[in-house]
Image: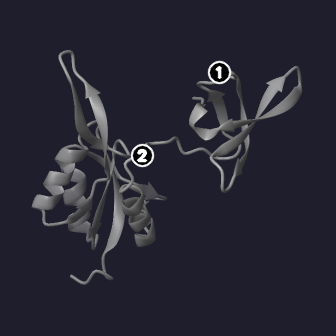
Amino acid sequence: MSSHDSHWYAIYTRSRHEKQVEQILRRMELETYLPLRQTWSSRLDRKQMIEVPALPGYLFVRCILYPERRAAIKRSVGVVHLVENTGRPCVIPPEQIHSLRVAMTSPDVQEHAYLNVGDRVRVKRGPFQGATGYLTRVDSGRPRLVVAVEWINRAVAIEIDARCVERED
């Protein structure tokens, strides 16, 4: 199989099944990528460093997605589905996989919510903790968000560190 004939696809797994699914796919002789990050695990009697998925619930597979292979992947224990758009598996550009691999070499990498302009968000820490509003701008070059907070049919804008904000469900 030529590497330019194959594509990267994202697989959504059951909760905490990412490593198991990766092993199953490797036994099927498929190239996989499961981004892992290290974190401290607090046990009752000790703390220890463990590896956890950087993108919980997701891993990537590179292959030529013949119908039989797609069916075999979907039947694998722990697989919920391939990430699709209009019923077709989404091809992940190799540049994105490469960028993710590069980012994962940093010891400071952390999962962060994917936010879009217009998302309703809540400030989870800092002096504005508990405030809610809509994300109005993401400034490039700085990890900052500008959030419009509703107040008596008026809005005020506050600039907040992106790590202090989460999407409100």
Tag nearer the camera, 2 or 1: 2
| Residue bearing the label numbered 2 | 108
Nearer the observer, 51 or 14: 51
Q: Residues within 10 Å of mark 2 (few under 14, many from 20)?
A: few
The answer to whether 90 appears left or right of 45 in the picture is right
| Residue bearing the label numbered 1 | 129
Q: Residues within 10 Å of mark 1 (few under 14, many from 20)?
A: few
Q: Secondary structure at mark 2?
A: loop
The x and y percentages for residue 143 are: 62, 46
* Circle number at residue 99: none
Q: Amino acid at mark 2?
A: Asp
> Residue 25 falls in which quadrant of the image?
bottom left
Q: Amino acid at mark 1?
A: Gln
The x and y percentages for residue 23 are: 14, 52
Residue at x-position 42% and y-position 46%: 108
Residue at x-position 63% and y-position 24%: 126
Residue at x-position 20% and y-position 49%: 21
Q: Marks 2 and 1, Cα distance to the nearest angstrom?
A: 24 Å
Nearer the observer, 163 or 122: 163
Q: Quadrant of the C terminus?
A: top right
Q: How is the image coloured?
A: one colour
Query: First in sequence: mark 2 or mark 1?
Result: 2
Q: Secondary structure at mark 1?
A: loop
Residues marked 2 and 1 touching at CB (< 8 Å): no
